[in-house]
Image: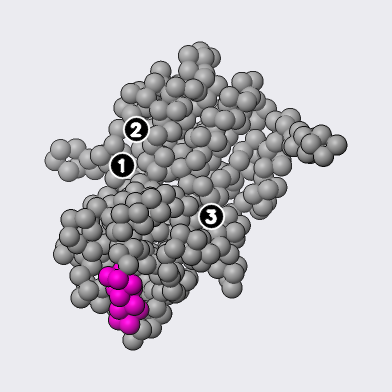
Amino acid sequence: MIQAEDFIECARGFGYRLYAGVPCSFLTPFINYTIDDERLTYVSSANEGDAVATGAGTVLGGHKAVVMMQNSGLGNAVNPLTSLAHVFRIPVLVIVTLRGDPDLRDEPQHELMGRITGGLLEAMAIPWEYFPTAATSIEACLQRAEAYMARELRPYALVMRKGSVAPHGLMGGRNKLQQDPDHRPRTSAGQTLVPRLSRAKVLQRIIELTSEKNTAMIATTGYTGRELFALADRPNQLYMVGSMGCASSLGLGLALARPDLRVVVIDGDGAAMMRMGNFATLGSYGAGNLVHIVLDNGVHDSTGGQATVSSNVSFAGIAKACGYPIALEDDNLAILDHLLSGTDRVGPRFGCLKIRPGTMHDLPRPALSPAEVRARFMAHIGANLSFISEARGHALS
């Protein structure tokens, strides 16, 4: 195990000043260290592909860049890695965390990517090695990466296993959204107003306002699904455990297939920004049975509380501009009553609730596997996968 300082200061000696990426708990020490150092730049990207493009742009400007991501997001980066960095011969140093390491027990959504991470990098013609776990190995590792990138002008990857880097707390104040643990609104004089709501309180109100019988609920990955499970594990609830940012698209497909159901998508600010194009798609195709709710706490909560850029974003303004006929934004539970209690069917409804960071104490994970949650959910709404076996049988006959 090394300290974040060991690698970053050595990398600084090689000329690396910019780090762009999407948070992973393995990367938290790196992110905190770069945020605290005014001579370094950390860009919190909306998705992993954007991080690659940002790094590539930095290289085009004559500076070196490190791109960081969890391996679950490596799929988001395939296109810019292959059709931008490779084609234009733009060398960026890529750090990919190894969730789903075959040698360790991890969550089910990481299992497949854990097995294929190395193969996927190799398929993209990106040479890789494991991230150094001894301070004495860092310089030689970076020298190998530098030699390859200088020769080939293409990316080089370091795959980081769990426990490679020791924890590093955020010491300074450049991550401004994290200075206020309640993320509370303030007056112009700086006086704290009423503390913002917790995620659990908002989810509890959503549960109270939705019928288990005719409502289908999609909860985004991270703490949202886990808290929803902890509060009330109902068969009409689907807890996403991966595919960050895809909850709204999944909800749209369900709402189009089942106009008899009210489909409620519970999203997060980081996830919503990762797939912001979904707003335009939902605004164009969504019907009155679709409700899209974003819980905005200004941070990536489940990976260590790294700040998002949502303080500069009006999600309701974006939703309105993208065609949602109803788009609300507040830190008051009353907007949920408007979104979930109305009877008009004018089109998809959108609401953004500003909440505070943090989660419930001893937060459990769903007791069922993702496949079991899916099967229970489909059985509850009267759907099944028999048409797949029927189609296969027809094709084989």
With 244 as the anchor, is 357 left or right in this view? Answer: left
Do the residues under discs 2 and 1 have CB atoms within 8 angstroms? Answer: yes
- Tell me which secondary structure the magenta stretch mostly adopts: helix
Whether residue 147 is in magenta: the answer is yes
Disc 2 marks which amino acid? Phe
Q: What residue is disc 2 on? A: 315
Q: For the residue labelled by badge 3, is the local secondary structure a helix, a strand or a loop? A: loop
Quick one: quadrant of the N terminus? Answer: bottom left
Disc 3 marks which amino acid? Leu
Quick one: quadrant of the C terminus? Answer: top right
**Disc on the earlier residue, 3 or 2:** 2
**Disc on the earlier residue, 1 or 3:** 1
With 105 as the anchor, is 190 left or right in this view? Answer: left
Which percent across, then down, holds residue 345?
A: 52, 14
Residue 55 image-quadrant placement = bottom left
In this picture, which residue range is highlighted in magenta? 139-151
Disc 1 marks which amino acid? Ser
Q: What residue is disc 3 on? A: 363
- Considering every residue shown, the one lying at the far right of the view is 397
Q: What residue is disc 1 on? A: 310
**Location of residue 269 with respect to 135 vertically, above or below:** above
**Location of residue 269 with respect to 209 vertically, above or below:** below
Calculate the distance from the C-alpha at mark 3 to the C-alpha at mark 2. Answer: 28 Å
